Image (spheres, grey):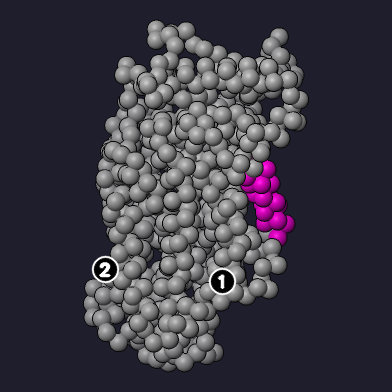
Amino acid sequence: MTSNAEKFGQDNPGFQIENGENGRATKDSETKIKVDSIETERAQWGNGLEFLMSCIAMSVGLGNIWRFPFTAYENGGGAFLIPYIVVLIVIGRPLYYLEMALGQFTSRGNVQSFSSLSPAIKGIGYGQLLGSTCIATYYCSLMALTLFYLVSSFTSDLPWSHCKVEWETENSQRNVTCVSSKDTESVTGRNKISSSELWFTKEVLKEKEQINDGVGPPEWRLTLCLLVAWFLTFAVSVKGVKSSGKVSYFLALFPYVVMGALLIRAVTLEGSTEGMLYFVTPQWSKLARAEVWYAAVTQCFFSLNVGLGSIIMYSSYNSFDHNINRDALVVTTLDTFTSLLAGTTIFGILGNLAHELNVPVEDVVKSGGTGLAFISYPDAIAKFQSVPWLFAILFFIMLFVLGIGSLVALHGCANTMIMDNFPTIKPWKVSAATALFGFLVGLVYITPGGQFILTVVDFFGGNMVIFVFAIIEIVTLMWCYGSENFCNDLEFMTKQKVGIYWRITWTIITPLFLIIVFIYSLATLTRLDYGSYEISDLALGLGWAIVCVSVMIFASFFGVSFYKNRKFGFPAMIWETFNTTNWGPENHSVRLAWKEEKLRKSAEVASSGKIWITRKLNFLIGR
């Protein structure tokens, strides 16, 4: 029977040289790997800049504009930057580079990448796919809302800027008074509510106060907007990366043009300085609270798109020797800069609103997310003395373009999974089918009770599922396959030694930090609600069902693999289950060269005579 040592790491039989028609791998004078021309060609980016622009468009999205400013505000203001940057350094950036490396090394989407490492962990890819599908379906519904607001902004009299007569009956029953958003009267008094908030809940969402009797039918105007949003996403993805890569320049750069214009306008508004200072003024006492650090982790995940499979998918279309180290640093740094820029702009405008109302800044900040994008910000724009419609148009165009960039990546995860398994299907057919599926599922979010469902799916499918599989992902790669093996693979691909920062974060800091934060989140878990409304038990059951299904998918692949290897007996069946024979680069000649390098490394280890603990410590410090 084969020994356990021969099943893992550098002694794995998957590293044996294959005997084929091509013999040994060939290298040119610069030691770059030659690619066999006889192999089936996988689509690739037109150039490295397309990949970088696509990653920027994917990572810089709605989370930077409407989630980060409010999250920072309620978690210590300027002091929140400390835990956020720490989390970025020890979790966000390492995971981003890890997933880039995984996709480029295997030239496969996330499902096939994990399957090639071991069929038993194929469920990681499907778990990530389930999470990204949950996010994509509700993400597009938010884009439908954005598109509805954009169309509604093409008028000199913004529709949310004044109260409507038909609201008076219900307002009197609720004992609330509507205050026109274009007036300079404060709405912070008791039983007062702005026209922008009423327009959002009554005219746009037609929102229900509970969903015990169902969510209701989809709103027809939002249905059309949802259809347009998915059609545009399909149009960008119609030819895979060959089409999305060309559009990526616009999706990545145009939002900065609009954001720059809004920032210039913000700093010229009276009272904007107070708003900006309020955003960055640190509240040091909040740094001692564990929930602030948890908020930093969730914001980092939401903003960078780590754990969704989209980074693996995008990098799988790179050439094998692309410089992903540089791209990972550029994207993660730019993402943080964009969040700060957006926060400064948003709070500058809210500072002007506070000045106009003669109230403190905190009194005009209602909430983050949809509340900031569709209530607080439109409320502030309505009070502009000159061309408020222009700034409304600019803001919602920026949001929509940012949303398209992120949704294209989420859409691409499902497309790549299907095309990796069925490469003969035309990309446009796959893109059309997945877009239609996303549209049909997304209809539930544009019903009167849709925001309740969105809250549930976001928390369980978009947060908890992604968090669970991010932990499983890094533990599997770093502790099961081995961080030393992974770094050796990365060095072979990039021709650069992996730095001590990546070695220590991947091996120790990132997985432990994620596990601790996840345990804390479970220990402090409270009943989910939507604003002042309580989420029904049925809706919560749906959320937990999403988590259970994802875990069951992962467990089922484990079970099937163990069952297939039961003939080896225990514990040999474990080693057979995690046999990494199929792991390695997709291209045949590159794979041969990689296996030769693995054998050379294995011989070095055998001849060194170092004990296991000494070798691991030397690896961590880069010796």
Point 33% across, 68% down: residue? 260
Q: Which residue is mark 2?
A: 151
* Residue type at numbered disc 2: Val
19 displayed left or right of 581? left
- Distance from disc 2 to disc 1, alpha carbons, whole Å, reads 35 Å
In x, y percent, where is residue 515? Answer: 68, 48
Report crowding for label 1: few under 14, some 14 to 19, many 20 or more residues within 10 A (C-alpha): some
Viewer can see residue 200: no
In x, y percent, where is residue 20? Answer: 43, 8
Quadrant where the C terminus sits is top right
State whether residue 522 is above or below residue 275. above
Name the foreground residue: 116 vs 148: 116
Quadrant where the N terminus sits is top right
Point 27% across, 42% down: residue? 243
State whether residue 572 is above or below residue 327. above
Kindly state the secondary structure of the residue where label 2 is placed: helix
Q: Which residues are magenta?
A: 505-524
509 displayed left or right of 340? right
Q: Which residue is mark 1?
A: 78
In x, y percent, where is residue 404? Answer: 34, 54
Is 564 in the magenta? Answer: no
Viewer can see residue 358: yes
Q: Earlier in the sequence, mark 2 or mark 1?
A: 1
Name the foreground residue: 161 vs 372: 372
Report crowding for label 2: few under 14, some 14 to 19, many 20 or more residues within 10 A (C-alpha): few
